[in-house]
Image (cartoon, rainbow, N blue to C red):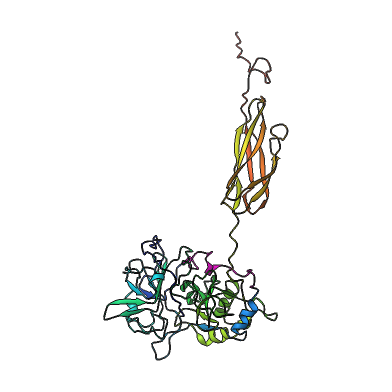
Amino acid sequence: MVRVAPRLSLVFSALCLAGVAHAQSCPATLPAQGAPIAAPLPVFPADNWWNTDISAAPVDPLSPAYIAWIDPAKPVHPDFGGAGAGTNEVYGFPYVMVNGAQPKWQVTFDYWDESDGNGVPFYPLPENVLTTVGWVEGGPPATVDLRGSNDRHILIVDCTNRTLYELYNAWFSSQERRWYAGSGAFFDMKTNNRRPEGWTSADAAGLAIFPGLVRYDEAANANVAEIQHAFRVTVRASNGHVYPASHSAGTTSGALPMGARLRLKKSVNGVDPVTRTNDPTARKIFRAMQKYGLIVADNGTDMYISGTYDVRWNNDTLNPAFHSLRAGDFEVVQLGWKPAPPLPTLSVGDVALSEGHSGTKTMSFTVKLSAASTNTVNVSFKTSNGSAVAGTDYTAALGTISFSPGQTSRSVAVTLRGDRTPEKSETFALNLSNPVNATLRDGVAIGTITNDDQLRTGGPGQKTPPTPAAVRFEK
């Protein structure tokens, strides 16, 4: 991992980052390495940048130049797998699962001013990472100091609180009983909280690592129809950063920035590149590359896709499948692209009002916008008869209402005509149509004109005959 000097002096308070506990499904035995992640999947909210559908996102104008810089013939490579034969080395990112009761350790950071939980016990590191091969990136336990030759990431998922802790370049000093790391980051997987602009994380781009990994429990699980997130990818050098990244790790001219998205094309020379392999696991991964893409997250080797360490991976199948793809099969999505926010919705509520004996009354319908918009919102309205008839019971209304930016409520007035005719309650409708900068959620309201005229017996103007009096017959 390539780093640049810290640029901010702000420090996250661990207290400010304490997440609210949400009961989640945890394995019976914890801590565990590589345990399946419980639903809901994917991790993080559905509208998180890792989980955003980019299949219809525009292509960046400089996409051909960026792909040329990488080299269109460069093969894609799965940067994950199992364990090295006869060694302590593991291939890919291990991750550790703990519950909310796991004791926490204080970690001393090189990049303390861009790390979370600095100076307090904050990271739920189990003893297994000190004693067991395969719990720390690279393989050997954290007591072995390999910081100069390996990134030595430790990824920890708290399954009770659905939170994520990530450390970069971690080492535990057995002599001091103290943890050291280059940097550390905390992520609440129930939110879309982004790192402060300019901050790193345990990854050069300032992003979480775990949600961008190809995981065996998704890719090779027949019960998971499709993978619903993007994958982490590295390039040999980078140039600045764009959303969703928050941190830069280079200024190489012509290179992609951190946070750039690459998308596997749907068709190359008239053929879907997914079909270059018959392996169902690889095909599922490739389909995710078409829908969710790759996010540049670190400097390393061009077109290396990150995944979890798992002894169940079959690299004899994965490697040739991945190598069938080339950088030229991808396109760069418009830099910094994010989907347009969903349009607010319009609704109108029913109203009931007595008609009155004479003259007119005003029935007011409230039209609501679900959220304030930065744009002017317009919607047309028109009344239509039900049992109530325009011109007799009410005055027809037709027009357009506008919501200025920031407004969320407007009203439509309809005039009712009073009379003294006893009758049942009558109804008409107010219909909304043709919304601009909004959509209709409930576009029809019923106006009920309630009768307030009582039936009368006898006297002038009597409309119904009086009830006859009882008649008594005598013998």
Residue furthest right as drawn = 391
* Residue at (55, 82) in percent of width and height: 303
- Give x and y (percent) for residue 369: 59, 49
- Residue 379, relative to residue 239: is it above or below? above
Residue furthest top as drawn = 475
User: Looking at the image, can residue 277 be seen?
Assistant: no
Quarter assignment of residue 325: bottom right
Depth check: 428 or 72 in front? 72
Q: Is residue 385 covered in magenta? A: no
- Residue 435, relative to residue 15: is it above or below? above
- Residue 261, relative to residue 80: is it above or below? above
Quarter assignment of residue 113: bottom left
Q: Is residue 53 covered in magenta? A: yes
255 left or right, relative to 127: right
157 left or right, relative to 427: left
- The stretch of residues the image draws in magenta is 39-60
Depth check: 316 or 171 in front? 171
Depth check: 341 or 125 in front? 341
